[in-house]
Amino acid sequence: METNGLFITGTGTEIGKTVIAGCLAATLKQTGINVGVMKPISSGDINDALFLKHTAQVDDPMTLINPISLKYPLAPSVSARIEGKKIEIKDIDKAINTLSKKYDFLIVEGVGGIAVPIMDEFLVAHLIQHLQLPILIVADVGLGTINHTLLTVAFARKLGIKIVGIVLNSLRSKEVGLAEETNPHEIEKLAQIPVLGVIPYEGRLDSQYPDRNFMVDFFNQHVDINNIGQIIETI
């Protein structure tokens, strides 16, 4: 299947994928792009999907934005097994096909990292392959991120997944140290993937429903949106 969009994945869970996806959706919408959002699978709650719905200002039902919602904050395969539920990829296909007809571009946020199991040996990476979407990788800017980011890049490349860029995100309020100063350059050099921006910690983005205008201004300050726009034109 083919969808015009971008899949937001990360080097792990709680890495800031939802904030980056929401900021990107809000920014693209402000530039005039008819953008929709989707969180195909959620584990634990649907707060991420609600955040995306708010930032993109869409009126789609949650059954389209988040077609598979699982109870426990675990890998989807584990949560589904505990709940006695069967994950059906066809439910995701149906939702994304509907949204693709309504929007010119879709921001799709994954669950956890790229190697998280959805069911049996079917991983998030395999869902990305199935949806035929390029990915934007979100990673922590701090110590340890070089290893995590390069492993994510290598795994995606092994499966033939197109990587459009990397955004580094500050997860906590702290002073910038040597790791934060040097990691962007090292990652870009070693991965041969553009680092499109480095996002500092901002408490106002921790809100469930942050101010959209602030999000757009903040995102534009720290991410090269023109570069992202050029990338989108080539997708």
Image (tube, grey):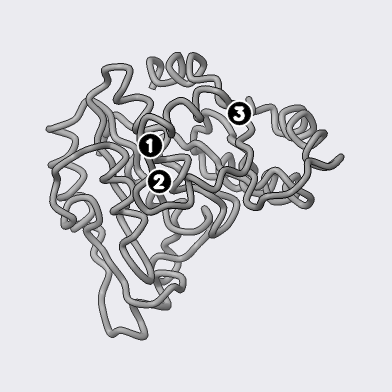
Q: Residue at x 51, y 38 (%)?
A: 160
Q: Secondary structure at mark 3?
A: strand
Under circle 1, the secondary element is: loop
Q: Position of residue 217 (x, y in %)?
A: 46, 25
Q: Earlier in the sequence, mark 1 or mark 2?
A: 2
Q: Are marks 1 and 2 in contact (CB under 8 Å)?
A: yes
The type of residue carrying mark 3 is: Gly
Please name the residue that numbered disc 2 is placed on: 128
The Cα–Cα distance between marks 1 and 3, rounded to whole angstroms, is: 21 Å
Above or below, 42 relative to 204: below
N-terminal-most mark, 3 or 2 = 2
Tell me the CA gap for discs 3 and 2.
23 Å
> Which residue carries the number 3 mark?
197
| Vertical placement of residue 50 versus 82, above or below | above
Which one is in front, 62 or 128? 62
**How far across and down, in percent of the image, does residue 154 sit?**
65, 43
Instruction: Give how far apart the Cα atoms at labels 1 and 2 are.
Output: 6 Å
Q: Image quarter for residue 157?
A: top right
- The number of numbered badges drawn on the structure is 3
> In the rendered image, which quarter contains the N terminus?
top left
Of labels 1 and 3, earlier in sequence is 1
